Image (cartoon, grey):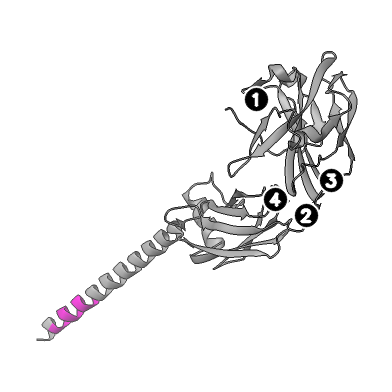
Amino acid sequence: MLGITMGVVALGFIFISPAYAVPISPDKYYLDVSYGMELDNMLLIMGREELAGAITLYLTPVGMKKYGEEHEREFYIADPENPAEPANWVTLSATSIEIGSGQEVRVPWTMTPSKYVGCGTNLAAIMVSDTPTVDSAEDGIVTVRREIISQIHLNVLATDQGACLDNKVDLNLREFFVDKKIPVFNYDDIPFVTRIENEGNLISRSPQGFIDILGFGDKITVPFNEEKLDIYPQTVRKFDNMWTDSEYPDNGNFGDKLLYEISHLRIGRYEARFGVTKNADPAIVSSAYFWVIPWRVLLVVGGVIVVFVTYKLAKRKKSRRKEKDADVERH
């Protein structure tokens, strides 16, 4: 089966061609519902000025699954006979629209969970395409060549059996480490990898925090999860962070880099102290360690020491030779 991968963006775009790209908003819904309630929503579709003429777009509720540890999602055509499928709880006011240059079309839609709704976060989506659904699915899996997906995250608070008392987000740190086999750096970029598991049944929305780098020199703070990525229920999310000294003269010569390293000296063992404090209860904390060895500075200092020691030894040897010659003359 063919899955698709999509990044997180502020607005979605229909991947038809640059001339026909049509933004939609929002690209994600986060809804709290209970069985028996009906929730009204709105999808905004915007026609770009570059559109040469009116185009027809088709809207279809589809199923969604999360897989992998990064941005992977799988969108599929839901079985219309399955009342437990969240995509079947979506009712669109229109399944096709026409839109032209500079136009905005608002499509109301309703979410009505069935009695088969389950506790926790349920997933669905609305697909907007320039072709009917039957022409844009392969083996039931929606392709991303000419579609855009508005994702629906549905937190179910109560079913027909009562309140979902066991709903929770349960974050656990799997790993936090410096992503280098031998964690020794000069003034290179320093990569960190974090893997956090959500063992609960609710989506964890954008847990955020920091990576503090502590050691010789000023403390450095690297923001964690600035992209506000979510951690889905029963999944592990991988986060990549990088500390980069933005002022370091990467394109400079040896002397430029040496002067910078001397004036911003970092040397020795460092602690990377990791913490997630926003949207994480309890907070997640951990540490990893690495070394900074400024080889240019050490090379120059070592060279100066060698020259100095050589000079002192030569001077001492010369002095002893003079003393020996003086003793010879006295005798």
Secondary structure category for the residue under label 1: loop
Residue 209 visible within the image: yes
Determine the CA span between mark 2 and mark 1.
32 Å
Name, please, the residue furthest toward the front.
Answer: 161
Q: Which mark is residue 226?
A: 4
Secondary structure category for the residue under label 4: loop
User: Which of the two labelled residues, at mark 3 and mark 1, occupies the earlier sequence position?
Assistant: 3
- Residue 113 covered by magenta stretch: no
- Residue 7 vs residue 60, the one in the foreground: 60
User: Which of the two labelled residues, at mark 2 and mark 1, occupies the earlier sequence position?
Assistant: 1
Percent coordinates x, y for residue 330 in the rendering = 13, 86
Determine the CA span between mark 4 and mark 3.
34 Å
**Which kind of residue does numbered mark 4 sit on?**
Glu
**Which kind of residue does numbered mark 3 sit on?**
Tyr
Residue 272 visible within the image: no
Q: Which mark is residue 148?
A: none
Percent coordinates x, y for residue 293 in the rendering = 45, 60
Percent coordinates x, y for residue 220 in the rendering = 62, 61
Looking at the rendering, the stretch of residues picked out in magenta corresponds to: 319-327
**Which kind of residue does numbered mark 1 sit on?**
Gly
Residue at point 66%, 38% (across, down) = 65
User: Which of the two labelled residues, at mark 4 and mark 3, occupies the earlier sequence position?
Assistant: 3
Residue at numbered disc 3: 35
Mark 2 surroundings within 10 Å by alpha-carbon count, few (fewer than 14), some (14 through 19), many (20 or more): some
**Foreground disc of the pair 2, 4:** 2
Mark 1 surroundings within 10 Å by alpha-carbon count, few (fewer than 14), some (14 through 19), many (20 or more): some
